[in-house]
Image: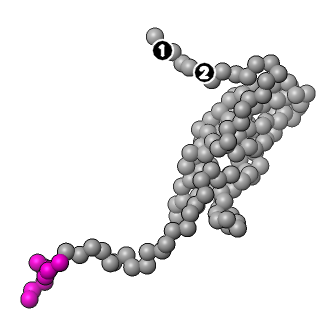
């Protein structure tokens, strides 16, 4: 028999403990009642990839959807890879997630651009200017004639 373990939900009146490594964001969606609902969520970033086509962020997007009157519609999460822009700041580069649509519980949530809070600062490392200089074996090279 397969057993699935779920995280315990906070009881009535309790607040959930926020993840210190998550970035908060918000969005809007068309509620099942036909009005505009709101979504409060967080992103747990797993990876930032920089390619010639641009920067991409992979992570888990979790959100709680609320109707226009504040009643909870539901909560859901999705693992996604989304495009990001890199913005230079005083302490280095910051990833900014572009505006996007996220499907939670079958509802399309519109999310505005938001900046990802870095969990680990990038340290400056010394530049290695001479990549050709390697540890060379002593003695004459067997490929060179004398």
Seen in the picture, residue 81 relative to 66 is either above or below; the reply is below
Q: Residue furthest left?
A: 146
Q: Determine the main secondary structure of the stretch shown in magenta.
A: loop
Residue pointed to by mark 1: 2
Describe the element under mark 1 as helix, strand or loop.
loop
Seen in the picture, residue 6 relative to 126 is either above or below; the reply is above
Q: Residue furthest bottom?
A: 146
Describe the element under mark 2 as helix, strand or loop.
loop
Q: Is residue 16 magenta?
A: no
Closer to viewer: mark 1 or mark 2: 2
Which quadrant of the figure contains the C terminus?
bottom left
Image coordinates for residue 56, horizontal then vertical, percent: 58, 54
On the image, which quarter does residue 138 sit in? bottom left
Seen in the picture, residue 90 relative to 57 is either above or below; the reply is below
Residue drawn where x is 51% and y is 68% of the image: 125
On the image, which quarter does residue 108 sit in? top right
In this orientation, which residue lies closer to the viewer: 89 or 87?
89
Would you say residue 102 is visible in this rendering?
no
Residue drawn where x is 76% and y is 19% of the image: 11
Residue drawn where x is 33% and y is 78% of the image: 132
Image coordinates for residue 27, horizontal then vertical, percent: 79, 41
Residue pointed to by mark 2: 6
């Amino acid at each position: 028999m397969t057993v699935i373990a779920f995280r315990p939900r906070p009881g009535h009146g309790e607040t959930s403990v926020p993840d210190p490594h998550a970035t908060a964001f918000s969005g809007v969606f068309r509620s099942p009642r036909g009005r505009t609902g709101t979504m409060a969520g967080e992103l747990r970033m797993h990876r930032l990839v920089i390619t010639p086509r641009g920067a991409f962020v992979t992570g888990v997007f979790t959100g709680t959807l609320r109707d226009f009157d504040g009643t909870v519609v539901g909560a859901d999460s999705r693992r996604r890879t989304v495009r990001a822009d890199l913005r230079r700041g005083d302490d280095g580069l910051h990833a900014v997630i572009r505006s996007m649509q996220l499907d939670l519980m079958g509802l399309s949530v519109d999310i505005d651009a938001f900046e990802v809070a870095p969990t680990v600062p990038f340290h400056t490392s010394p530049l290695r200017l001479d990549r050709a200089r390697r540890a060379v074996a002593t003695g004459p090279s067997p490929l060179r004639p004398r």
